Image (cartoon, rainbow, N blue to C red):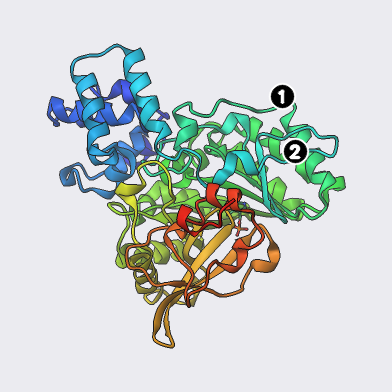
C-alpha cells in the first residue's frame, strides 16, 4: 500500500444499506450483520473507506475502539428493543414496519437532551426566528449551516444522532447567511461564531466560504473569533490534503486569519489512533500553516477511550502536532447513553490520571465537563468537608454568566453519571442555580425529581 494511493483516495461512504455488501464485514456471521441492521435502523450508521482501511484493527473485533466508535453494537439498544428490531430484520419485514418500530424506540432515547429545541431558538430584532442557530452563552453563537447536516462518518455515541435519523426535520431559513449576519449585528456582545452541524467540513470550499465570508465584513468587526466544529481531521483528513478543493479550503482559512480574526478548528478526536496516520498528521500541519489553531475535544466513552493512558497519549500526540487540548466531555444523556456512560467519579479519575501524565502544554484541557441545560458543569474534584464526601463542581459556561467559576457541591455518588443524578451536599434543598427557575421548568429539565418539588 503506497502512501500516494491511500492518500488520494476518493471519498466513499457506506450506510445501513451496504452492511451485507461490505467486504470488511464478510467475515461476520449473517446473524451478526442482521444485528447491525437491527441497531442501525434505530441509530445512525455511516462509515467511509479511510476509516475501514486505516483506523479499524479488524483482528480486534468487537473490542477495537474505532469499530466501537463507528459500528452499531447489539447492546446499544435495550435488550427488549434489540429483540424487537432483530426479529423484524430476520424475517425480512417491510421497510415501513421497520421504520415505525425504530421510530417508537428513538422517541424513548431522549432525542433532544438539554431542551435544545425549545429553549435556544434565537430571533432577529423584528421577530424572525433563526432555527439554524443557538445562542446560549453571551459571547458565542452556534450556527448549523443547512448544507453541513451530515458527517464523513458517524460516531455511535453522537448526541446529535436524532437529526441523522430524520427525527428533526430541516428547519432552516432560505436566507440563513443573511439572517446570521443580521443577528450578529443586532447583538454586539457576540464575538465568537461557532459553525457546527453535522460537520461543516462536509461542505465544498465554495459553500463554506459563502457562510464564513459575510462575517469578515468591516461592519462585523465585533466578531473576533470563528470556530468550526469538525470530526474531519480524524475521519477524513483528505479534506485538507488531497480533496480536489483542499487548497481552496486552506485559502479560506488564510483569508479568515488575514482579516485579523482567530480561526479555530475544534477537532473532535476520540482516540489517539485517529492521529496516527501520515495523512492525519499532514492535515493538522496544513491547517496550522494557514494560521488557524487546532483545538481538540471529545467525550469520554466506555468501549472507546475510557482509560487514562489513552487520553494521555492522545493529548501528547496532539501537543506534538501543535494542537491544543481543549475539553474532555462527559457522555450526554441521550441515545445509547447506557452503553457508553462512565460514572462521574470514574471520569474524574481517568481525567486526573491522564492530566498527570502530560506536561503543562497539554494541561490546557478542561474536564470532565457536562454540557447540561444550565451550562457546562466541570467536575473539578472530590473532597471531604466536615465528614461529608462531596463532588466539587463549577460552571465553565452558564446561561447566567455570573454563575461561572463559583464552586458548588454535590453529595458524592459513585454511580452518578449526569448532573440530574446529583443532589446538593450539606442537606441543602437545591443547587444555587436552580432557584431562578420555576418548578415546571425544573422538572422538565430533570434537575429535580418529582418528590423534591413543592406542590403546585
Ligand atoms: C460548548 C458550547 C459553546 C462554546 O463554549 P466554550 O466554552 O466557549 O467552548 C457555546 N454554546 C453552546 C450551546 C455550547 O454547548
- Please say whether residue 45 is visible from this viewpoint: no
Question: Measuring 35% from the left and 71% from the top, which residue is drawn there?
Answer: 349
Residue 89 on image: x %, y %: 23, 20
Q: Quick one: which residue is furthest to the front in this view?
A: 455
Tag of residue 298: none
Residue 50 on image: x %, y %: 35, 37
Determine whether, in the image, residue 361 is placed left or right of residue 292. left
Tag of residue 174: 1
Determine whether, in the image, residue 299 is placed left or right of residue 64. right
Q: Is residue 126 above or below residue 140?
A: above
Q: Is residue 264 above or below residue 78?
A: below
- The residue under label 2 is 180
Is disc 1 placed on a helix, strand or loop?
loop
Question: Measuring 75% from the left and 27% from the top, which residue is drawn there?
Answer: 175
Between 51 and 108, the residue placed more toward the observer is 108
Q: Quadrant of residue 28?
A: top left
Which quadrant of the picture is home to ligand 1?
Answer: bottom right
Question: Measuring 38% from the left and 64% from the top, which residue is drawn there?
Answer: 344
The N terminus is located in which quarter?
Answer: top left
Amino acid at each position: 500500500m503506497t502512501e500516494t494511493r491511500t492518500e488520494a483516495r476518493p471519498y466513499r461512504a457506506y450506510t445501513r444499506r451496504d452492511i451485507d455488501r461490505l467486504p470488511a464485514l464478510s467475515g461476520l456471521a449473517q446473524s451478526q450483520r442482521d444485528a447491525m441492521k437491527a441497531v442501525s435502523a434505530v441509530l445512525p450508521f455511516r462509515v467511509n473507506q479511510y476509516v475501514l482501511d486505516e483506523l479499524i484493527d479488524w483482528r480486534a473485533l468487537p473490542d477495537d475502539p474505532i469499530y466501537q466508535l463507528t459500528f452499531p453494537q447489539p447492546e446499544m439498544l435495550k435488550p427488549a428493543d434489540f429483540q424487537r428490531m432483530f426479529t423484524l430484520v430476520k424475517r425480512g419485514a417491510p421497510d415501513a414496519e421497520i421504520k415505525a418500530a425504530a421510530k417508537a424506540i428513538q422517541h424513548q432515547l431522549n432525542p433532544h437532551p438539554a431542551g435544545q429545541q425549545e429553549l435556544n431558538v434565537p430571533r432577529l430584532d423584528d421577530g424572525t426566528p433563526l432555527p439554524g442557530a443557538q445562542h446560549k452563552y453571551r459571547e458565542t453563537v452556534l450556527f448549523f449551516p443547512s448544507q453541513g447536516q451530515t458527517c464523513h462518518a458517524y460516531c455511535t455515541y453522537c448526541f446529535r444522532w436524532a437529526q441523522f435519523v430524520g427525527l428533526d426535520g430541516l428547519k432552516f431559513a432560505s436566507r440563513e447567511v443573511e439572517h446570521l449576519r443580521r443577528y450578529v449585528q443586532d447583538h454586539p456582545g457576540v464575538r465568537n461564531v461557532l459553525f457546527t452541524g453535522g460537520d461543516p467540513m462536509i461542505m465544498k470550499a465554495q459553500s463554506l466560504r459563502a457562510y464564513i465570508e459575510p462575517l469578515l465584513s468591516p461592519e462585523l468587526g465585533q466578531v473576533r473569533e470563528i470556530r468550526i466544529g469538525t470530526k474531519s481531521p480524524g475521519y477524513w483528513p483528505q479534506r485538507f490534503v488531497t480533496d480536489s478543493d483542499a487548497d481552496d479550503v486552506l485559502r479560506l482559512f488564510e483569508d479568515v486569519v488575514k482579516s485579523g480574526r482567530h480561526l479555530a478548528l475544534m477537532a473532535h478526536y476520540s482516540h489517539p489512533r485517529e492521529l496516527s496516520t501520515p495523512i492525519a498528521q499532514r492535515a493538522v500541519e496544513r491547517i496550522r500553516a494557514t494560521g488557524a489553531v487546532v483545538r481538540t475535544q471529545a467525550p469520554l466513552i466506555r468501549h472507546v477511550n475510557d482509560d487514562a493512558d489513552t487520553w494521555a497519549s492522545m493529548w501528547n500526540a496532539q501537543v506534538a502536532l501543535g494542537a491544543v487540548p481543549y475539553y474532555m466531555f462527559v457522555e450526554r444523556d441521550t441515545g445509547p447513553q447506557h452503553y457508553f456512560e462512565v460514572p462521574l467519579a470514574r471520569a474524574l479519575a481517568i481525567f486526573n490520571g491522564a492530566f498527570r501524565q502530560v506536561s503543562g502544554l497539554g494541561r490546557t484541557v478542561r474536564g470532565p465537563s457536562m454540557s447540561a441545560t444550565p451550562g457546562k458543569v466541570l467536575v473539578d474534584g472530590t473532597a471531604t468537608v466536615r465528614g461529608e464526601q462531596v463532588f466539587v463542581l463549577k460552571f465553565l459556561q452558564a446561561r447566567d454568566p455570573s454563575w461561572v467559576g463559583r464552586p458548588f457541591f454535590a453529595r458524592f455518588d459513585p454511580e452518578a453519571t449526569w448532573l440530574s443524578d446529583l443532589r446538593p451536599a450539606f442537606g441543602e434543598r437545591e443547587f444555587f442555580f436552580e432557584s431562578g427557575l420555576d418548578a415546571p421548568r425544573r422538572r422538565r429539565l430533570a434537575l429535580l425529581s418529582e418528590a423534591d418539588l413543592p406542590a403546585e
